[in-house]
Image (cartoon, rainbow, N blue to C red):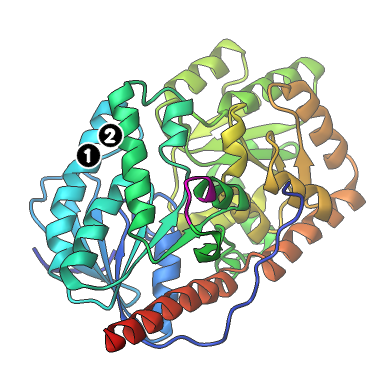
């Protein structure tokens, strides 16, 4: 962190947009903004710094999640991004009601702040969906356009997992969803399935751009696999001794990390040499740890560690023989665009997933990983063991992962696509204002 300045989806490809983008002042709103030195997904950081490199002025309005005594707004400069922070304590361990309170607390504070930062365009990214409130407020006050990015289909996901049950709350959330789309000049969706869900609300499909999570190829190529493996085993020597299968990410209510625990338990029963590692935290961390202890694998062939900053992820993931991206058996989760999936590709590692949807189509078509059935960890283990026992096939899967990262999901490519969308909205808005 820099110094404080003051207080049927079987394949997928990204279309290329027109080259270049005109510099403008972008007001970027994201409650969960993170940098490579902190924990969490860095999509907003990576996109914003690339917008800065293209000549844009970017102001990020976000929340400081740590309860460390800070009060009031403060500002830092991160890779050329002016970041405006307001302390709003938050973690994945909070109950859903506590999370909702944090969402609205931030929305209230961010609305006033954002409205006072001169800009040409507002770009707001969910989740949470409440980010639409300060975004629309700032856009209306400044009479500028708003572009809305959908990372998850809210409120669909909270409803299907039981977080939203009250009919009144569900109705309010549905209204907020329509409010966000109605006030957006364009919408960016992180997967084809999310696009389809947005279209179902009545939003014009011609105004939706699909720009998924992407691969930080420069970051992940900064360390070789040999260097990464050496780093990992020096820090975690217990992970040596056999092929390593890993999970890196949140242990939340929708993540099926217990699936990996069951894979480890079956592997131990069979005398398999496979090792399993989890790097992360979340609301289900205690339950996952308890299950691993109950199944007799914790500290034997499965280890659970805390989260690491993004800058350490290349060393961790490139050390894996097989990465994983796991979710509970919820059909709506097939539309996800999980960071861990793209990090595995960027690291040139094959990835095992336990869900269908567009990512399953990508893996099947490219050969870059394995698609296991949900709720069947034994089948997943058998698939993993077979792949890891065939060096030539494993090498081909690794090469396919790297090819996807470079040719379809490169961060620079997709940041360019986002810049094109924002530039088009900015230019169109200026023409409209000039004619008014």
- The foreground one among 67 and 134 is 134
The percent position of residue 251, horizontal first and vertical second, equals: 48, 32
Question: Would you say residue 195 sits in the magenta stretch?
Answer: no
Secondary structure of the residue carrying tag 2 is: helix
* Label placed on residue 99: 2
Magenta stretch bounds: 199-203
Q: Residue placed at 62% from the left, 53% from the top?
A: 192
Q: Main secondary structure of the magenta part?
A: loop
Secondary structure of the residue carrying tag 1 is: helix
Give the labeled residue for mark 1.
Answer: 102
Q: Is disc 2 in contact with disc 1, using a CB cutoff of under 8 Å?
A: yes
Answer whether residue 122 is visible to the viewer in this image.
yes
Q: Residue placed at 33% from the left, 22% from the top?
A: 167
User: Dot 1: few (<14), some (14–19), or many (≥20) neighbours within 10 Å?
Assistant: some
The percent position of residue 119, horizontal first and vertical second, equals: 23, 76
Q: Can you say whether 220 is above or below 170 in the image?
A: below
Quadrant for the C terminus in the image: bottom left
The percent position of residue 98, horizontal first and vertical second, equals: 24, 30
Q: Extreme front residue here?
A: 436
- The foreground one among 66 and 318 is 66
């Amino acid at each position: 962190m820099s110094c404080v300045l003051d207080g049927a989806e079987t394949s997928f490809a990204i279309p290329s947009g027109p080259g270049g983008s005109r510099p403008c002042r972008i007001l970027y709103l994201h409650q969960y903004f993170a940098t490579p030195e902190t924990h969490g997904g860095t999509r907003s950081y990576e996109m914003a710094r690339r917008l800065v490199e293209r000549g844009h002025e970017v102001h990020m309005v976000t929340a400081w999640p740590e309860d460390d005594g800070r009060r009031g707004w403060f500002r830092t400069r991160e890779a050329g991004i002016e970041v405006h922070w307001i302390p709003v304590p938050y973690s994945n361990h909070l109950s859903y009601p506590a999370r909702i309170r944090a969402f609205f607390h931030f929305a209230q504070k961010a609305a006033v702040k954002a409205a006072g930062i001169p800009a040409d365009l507002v770009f707001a990214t969910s989740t949470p969906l409440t980010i639409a409130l300060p975004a629309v407020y700032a856009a209306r006050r400044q009479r500028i356009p708003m572009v809305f990015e959908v990372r998850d289909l809210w409120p669909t996901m909270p409803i299907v997992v039981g977080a939203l049950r009250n009919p009144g709350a569900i109705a309010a959330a549905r209204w907020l969803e329509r409010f966000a789309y109605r006030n957006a000049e364009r919408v960016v969706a992180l997967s084809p399935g999310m696009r389809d869900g947005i279209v179902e609300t009545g939003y014009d499909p011609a105004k939706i751009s699909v720009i998924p999570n992407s691969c930080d190829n420069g970051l992940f190529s900064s360390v070789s696999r040999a260097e990464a493996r050496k780093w990992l085993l020096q820090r975690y020597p217990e992970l040596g001794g056999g092929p390593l299968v890993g999970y890196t990410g949140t242990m939340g209510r929708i993540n099926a990390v217990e699936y990996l625990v069951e894979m480890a338990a079956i592997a131990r029963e069979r005398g398999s040499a496979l090792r399993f590692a989890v790097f992360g935290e979340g609301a289900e961390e205690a339950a996952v740890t308890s299950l691993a202890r109950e199944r007799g694998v914790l500290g034997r062939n499965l280890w659970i560690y805390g989260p690491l900053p993004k800058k350490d992820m290349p060393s961790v993931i490139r050390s894996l023989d097989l990465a994983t991206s796991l979710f509970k058996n919820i059909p709506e989760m097939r539309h996800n665009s999980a960071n861990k999936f793209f990090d595995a590709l960027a690291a040139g590692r094959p990835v095992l997933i336990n869900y269908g949807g567009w990512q399953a189509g990508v893996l099947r078509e490219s050969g870059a990983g394995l698609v296991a059935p949900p709720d069947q960890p034994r089948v997943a283990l058998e698939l993993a063991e077979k792949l890891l026992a065939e060096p030539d096939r494993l090498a081909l899967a690794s090469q396919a992962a790297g090819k996807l990262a470079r040719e379809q999901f490169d961060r620079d490519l997709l940041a360019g696509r986002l810049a094109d969308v924002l530039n088009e909205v900015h230019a169109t808005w200026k023409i409209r204002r000039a004619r008014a």
